[in-house]
Image (tube, coloured by chain):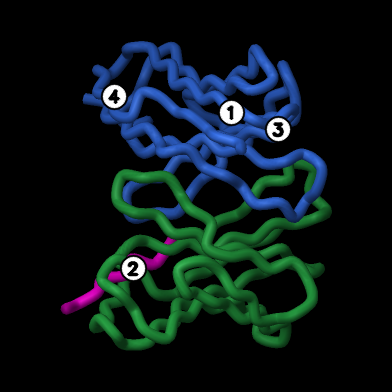
Amino acid sequence: SQTIHQWPATLVQPVGSPLSLECTVEGTSNPNLYWYRQAAGRGLQLLFYSVGIGQISSEVPQNLSASRPQDRQFILSSKKLLLSDSGFYLCAWKAPSSYNSPLHFGNGTRLTVT
Amino acid sequence: AQSVTQPDIHITVSEGASLELRCNYSYGATPYLFWYVQSPGQGLQLLLKYFSGDTLVQGIKGFEAEFKRSQSSFNLRKPSVHWSDAAEYFCAVGASDTGRRALTFGSGTRLQVQP
């Protein structure tokens, strides 16, 4: 069966420091991969998605970037964190073969920028 | 572009009472609709999904949802709520005509269950 792992679970970082969040998927090949951010009291905002190695699409301009160095690895990064980057970050995967397959989420990373 | 509205930010029900969470979507063609549940500090778990066919879909944990095209709605229901159902619920819509193949989520409804 497929599993998705996200780490770390929680992170406290000072403003201006770098960021690297990692997500890996097991048990499937060539998944679509997604990074969402969830701010307190708000819904999920799509940040990035990827349909293959090295292929990254950004949904909103921001201080963050994403990379997919391997088929089942998705990384969210920042060179210098802002206070507004605080939030709950969720990685998700989806089977690539059909539009109607659901997203499967990791357990998320709680990021606090101080 | 598709969008989802969950009009109720917060709902409180008594344990054993029935539940209905509202979801309205905006999309030009037939949407793919989903309901997810999120416990505090956790990721989202899929409750149920609608693609086509029978407009009443059954999900896990005793939940069901009904797709009503005329009202652009996909409301989630449960006949008898349990204390463990307290969580945040998200409605989401997917579309077949966008290359990004991502889901658009509503802002969520937080459910409290009173003993």
Residue found 65% across the figure and 52% down from its top: A102
| Residue stretch rendered in magenta on the structure | B106-115
Q: Which amino acid does label 3 sit on?
A: Pro
What kind of element bears circle 4? Answer: strand
* Chain letter of disc 4 in the image: A
Res. A25 mark:
1
Res. A31 mark:
3
**Magenta span has A31?**
no
* Chain letter of disc 2 in the image: B
Q: Which amino acid does label 4 sit on?
A: Leu
Along the viewing direction, whichever of B65 and A111 lies nearer the viewer:
B65
Kindly report the distance in space between the C-alpha atoms of the residues bearing marks 1 and 2.
28 Å
Q: What residue type is labelled 2?
A: Asp
Q: Please say if the residues under marks 1 and 3 sit with CB atoms less than 8 Å apart.
A: yes
Q: Name the residue under label 2.
A: B85
Q: In this view, does A15 lie to the left or right of B36?
A: left
Examine the residues drawn in magenta and state their main secondary structure: strand
Residue found 25% across the figure and 81% down from its top: B15
The quadrant of the rendering that contains the C terminus of chain B is bottom left
Q: Residue A110 is drawn in which quadrant?
A: top left
Q: Which amino acid does label 1 sit on?
A: Val
